[in-house]
Amino acid sequence: MTPNQDGPNAPQVSPGSKIPPEELDRMTDDIISALKTVYDPEIPSDIYELGLIYRVDIDDDRNVVIDMTLTAPGCPVAGEMPGWVENAVASVQGIQNVKVNMVFDPPWDQSRMSDEARVALDMW
């Protein structure tokens, strides 16, 4: 897998993808935008900027698999948030199916947060 965009959470595609590069770039941008609409209800920052998205994989059939985590395993929305992510990404034009896997390895920590999230949470 190779990153399609910069950043630790950038969606990845299989090498030699059959999806035209311009369509892949659009889908990637739209997936990131969709992920940024999902917020942890206890933290005023979106899950993408918080670094809760560990992996986004787009296959040649335009199916998306997302590995994500939570800020804490006991998060009260643990059962709901994967559905929120699935619904947000499924709304992206051209996406066929979305599967969200909840993972806790490695455990999330504040080092995964973007500068944007740090500013929003006043964590400088």
Image: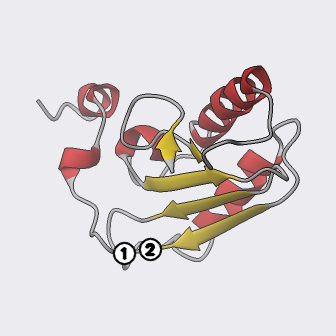
Identify which amino acid the numbered label 2 is placed on.
Answer: Val
46 or 11: nearer the viewer? 11
- Place of residue 63 in the rendered image (x, y in percent of width and height, measured from the top left): 79, 56
94 or 49: nearer the viewer? 94
Give the secondary structure at mark 2.
Answer: loop
Give the secondary structure at mark 1.
Answer: loop
Q: Locate residue 97: give its quadrant.
A: bottom right
Q: Residue furthest top?
A: 22
- Place of residue 23 in the rendered image (x, y in percent of width and height, measured from the top left): 79, 26
Residue 45 visible within the image: no
Residue 34 visible within the image: yes
47 or 67: nearer the viewer? 67
Identify which amino acid the numbered label 1 is placed on.
Answer: Phe
Residue that badge 1 annotates:
104
Residue at the location (37% across, 47% down)?
51
**In this rendering, position of residue 27 left or right of residue 7:** right
**In this rendering, position of residue 90 left or right of residue 44:** right
The correct choice, above or below, for 52 with respect to 105 in the image is: above
Q: How is the image coloured?
A: secondary structure
Residue that badge 2 annotates:
103
The correct choice, above or below, for 56 with respect to 46 in the image is: below
Residue at the location (11% across, 29% down)?
124
Q: Residues within 10 Å of mark 1 (few under 14, many from 20)?
A: some
- Place of residue 106 in the rendered image (x, y in percent of width and height, measured from the top left): 28, 69
The correct choice, above or below, for 61 with respect to 18 in the image is: below
71 or 28: nearer the viewer? 28
